Image: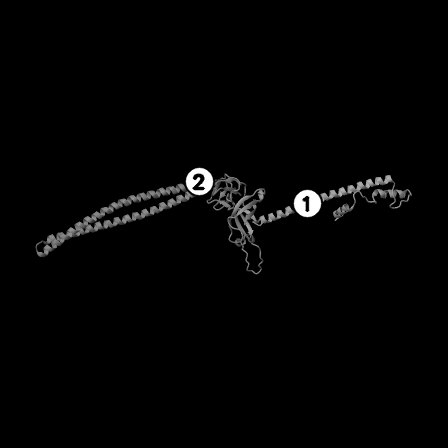
Amino acid sequence: MEVHRIVTLLRDMPHGQVDASAPDARSSDTGAKARGETRYEGAPRNPTEARHAGRSDKRSSQQDVDSWRSKLRRHAKVAGVAAVMFVAAVAAGVVWWLNARQYESTDDAFVDARTVSISSQINGAIVDVPITDNQVVDAGGVLLHIDDRDYRAAVDLATAQIDQAQASIANLDAQIEAQQARIEQAEKQVTEAQAALTFAQEEDARAQDLVKKGAGTQQRAQQTGSDLRQKQATYDGAQANLVAAQKQIAVLKTQRDGAGSQLEQAKASAEQAHANLARTTVTAPTAGRVTKITAAKGAYAQTGQSLMMFVPRELWVTANYKESQLAYMRPGQPVEIRVDAYSDRSFRGHVDSIQAGSGAAFSLLPPENATGNFVKVVQRVPVKIVFDEAPEVYLGPGMSVVPYVKVQ
């Protein structure tokens, strides 16, 4: 309003006209009154005084006009800058909103991994721990050594048992082979006795037939009968010898099977002994870092005792999104991952999978909503996000991240 008033005043005022009530005039009147002189308002001044007063008033008015014009120009510049900044802010806000609506983010996200508790599978004294805290090791790298003397002795004992079982099997095989020869001999004896018995039976039958007809003697008939009984006894003996030989080889084969079982048992013992011997050297299951080491040289390791923690190199992000953020989220969507520890960097990844259920549903004590005091709370669902490339910086489980999933 003030600017408008000044502009109007300047427009309506003739060029060179000044106000009669200028400061110099007022000061002159005041001086005249002080000297006791009476000057009527509007009375003409002397020419010199009027001329000087006119020039002074003109300069003062021109300075006021220039000052107001300078202020107007400054106000115009400030207003223009403010307008440009306002338009830029509105444009930036619109661009930000259009871009932000394509992403879903959460600060409830952490680096995750399947950490492994390294423990001993055997009992024994720890003789060496060649690694230190937070050391990077490759797959198969040695983590610690356990005293292996007892386990080497067990391997030697199992090897001796294998040799003994193999010797027993070889001995029984030889006996079975010899017994098989005896069986073959007994079978031949049975065949020979069978032939002799058959001939004796025929001779006795002919001698008995001749006696009945009166053509043969009784002595001959008695002799053939005696010979028949002798051949029958010989045949029975050969038959019994064959049966005994067959039973003996069956016993030997049973013993052979037993020796074979002992050999398998000895081999199993040897395999177990070798496995225990191998377990005296604890190695890394995969590439990663060792941390929280409690094993020490001279300590006694027991089966199942945790000796250190192992963090594999394979890491991912577990982001707990609100269920209201999952409407457009799908596996495979690109993700920008920002790690709090490296605020000036970002990492690329993608959505791997979405858990089939909220985190509360798989907690140790799931909520029971049928108790009558239900309060609706927005649930969070874990989303697994994997890195497109393994980060070349240090990351560990539990580190905070903020993922931005591009859902549209």
Left or right of residue 203, residue 331 in this image: right
- Within 10 Å of disc 2 (Cα), the crowding (few <14, some 14-19, many 20+) is few
Q: Position of residue 68 (x, y in %)?
A: 75, 43
CB under 8 Å between callouts 1 and 2? no
Type of amino acid at the residue the image marks with label 1: Gly
Residue beneath label 1, please? 80
Which sits in the foreground, 28 or 93? Answer: 28
Which sits in the foreground, 383 or 221? Answer: 383
- Within 10 Å of disc 1 (Cα), the crowding (few <14, some 14-19, many 20+) is few
Q: Position of residue 361 (x, y in %)?
A: 53, 54
Which sits in the foreground, 395 or 51? Answer: 51
SS class, disc 2: helix
Which residue is most to the right? 36
Q: Position of residue 293 (x, y in %)?
A: 52, 42
Q: Residue at x 23, y 50 (%)?
A: 240
Residue beneath label 2, please? 149
